[in-house]
Amino acid sequence: MSAPSPTSAPAAPAGPMSRYRVLDLTRIRSGPTCVRQFADWGADVIKVEPPDDASGYADRASSDFQNLHRNKRSLTLDLKSAEGREILMRLVDGADVLVENFRPRVKARLGLDWEGLHARNPRLVLGSISGFGQTGPYADLPGFDQVAQGMGGLMSVTGLPGQGPVRVGVPIADLTAGMFCAMGILMALLDRERTGEGRWVQTSLLQAQVAMLDFQAARWLIDGVVPGQAGNDHPTATPMGVYPTRDGSMNIAVTGARMWRDFCAVIGRPELADDPRYATGPKRLENREALNALVREITRTRTTEDLRSALEAAAIPCGPIYGIDEVFEDPQVRHLGLVGEVEHPVRGRLKVLNQPLRMSGAEPVLDRPTPEAGQHTVEVLAELGLDAEAIRGLKERKVV
């Protein structure tokens, strides 16, 4: 029986990705972060998961899980069984993208190697995320965000000087690996329009974390400087960092001669602009400790709102330091629509993080809550042409 077209999925609000079908074999965070980019923009995403997941990673009631897996359909499938793998291959026949974050050895054992999938469906784009890469001495080691943060250098430049290694407060390696994979898949889909063939897109937590070092990596690769911890101070510019105010603290970022001169006027010390200790960027960096001490004595005499208003009027970057609850009360955050809503059949309206980009003529498609495990199993199998008796038999054999 021929595989169904992706358009056989139930009708949903149209989005830029609505003509694509994505098979989601991912778990934890990096893979789901990748797939969410397609689900939120209208793709038909089928989440393939084990019939009995006792791993502890699928806490479906958690806010995290509800935020990560919205806009998908769920098919439970035992990929360790021959019947389960054959059903997956029939789905592969009609899919545009398959995303997985298995360790390479596990992927090969399940028959999800690139060569086999490409031979089965030459148009398929395979997105693979691993801890350390598909080949090499660490290829089959398990990956974890904090491990990648440490091995990728991030923990050595995060935190106060002399504090020791500090992790970033979000799983940045997981998140960026997912985003890099999504970007690669989009490029592969574009290239498929030219070649007619899919590609294998590969990234890892380690690759993503090293890439995110950005200018800190360049300081070593080009300048031979090993960056260290700088706390809240910018590593290469000052005054730039966290400064106390009468009622709290705030971020202030002063760069370039114009901003420096205007900043001196705002804090009521115009003579500092020409002080030989601080007149140039290199001099300010050389005398950072003394300059910061001076600036802090001034900023702590003013309220955050007063100082913020004055700095904004002078076009100097600045802003308050929010708790998470305060973030979502900010008028600009509200204006940008960074909170979306989905209707959950039990929990009612759930607020979730919305997509952080907008495009003319299209909106993110937030039309489905995170599905229950296997919620769409019968629906998806029926699309493959299986009748009720066949589906009942698969359930009895615990294939689905």
Image (cartoon, helix red, strand yellow):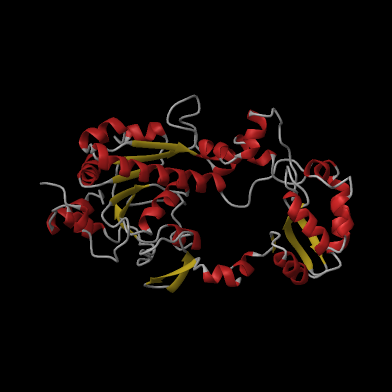
101 on left or right of 389: right
The spot of residue 135 in percent (x, y) is 44, 27
Q: Is residue 207 above or below residue 245?
A: above
Q: Nearer the viewer, residue 191 or 348?
A: 191
The spot of residue 189 in percent (x, y) is 31, 44
Residue 39, picture quadrant: bottom left
Q: Nearer the viewer, residue 225 or 161?
A: 225
Q: Residue furthest top?
A: 137
Q: Residue furthest left?
A: 1
Q: Is residue 280 above or below residue 119?
A: below
Residue 184 in view (yes/no): yes
Tell me what residue is drawn at x 17 percent, y 57 percent.
Answer: 382
Q: Residue furthest bottom?
A: 348
Residue 241 in view (yes/no): no
Q: Is residue 201 above or below residue 182?
A: above
58 on left or right of 242: left
Residue 218, picture quadrant: top right
Give the number of marks.
0
Q: Nearer the viewer, residue 5 or 221?
A: 221
The spot of residue 373 in percent (x, y) is 34, 58
The spot of residue 238 in percent (x, y) is 77, 48
Tell me what residue is drawn at x 87 percent, y 54 percent.
Answer: 272
267 on left or right of 78: right
Residue 149, picture quadrant: top right
344 on left or right of 245: left
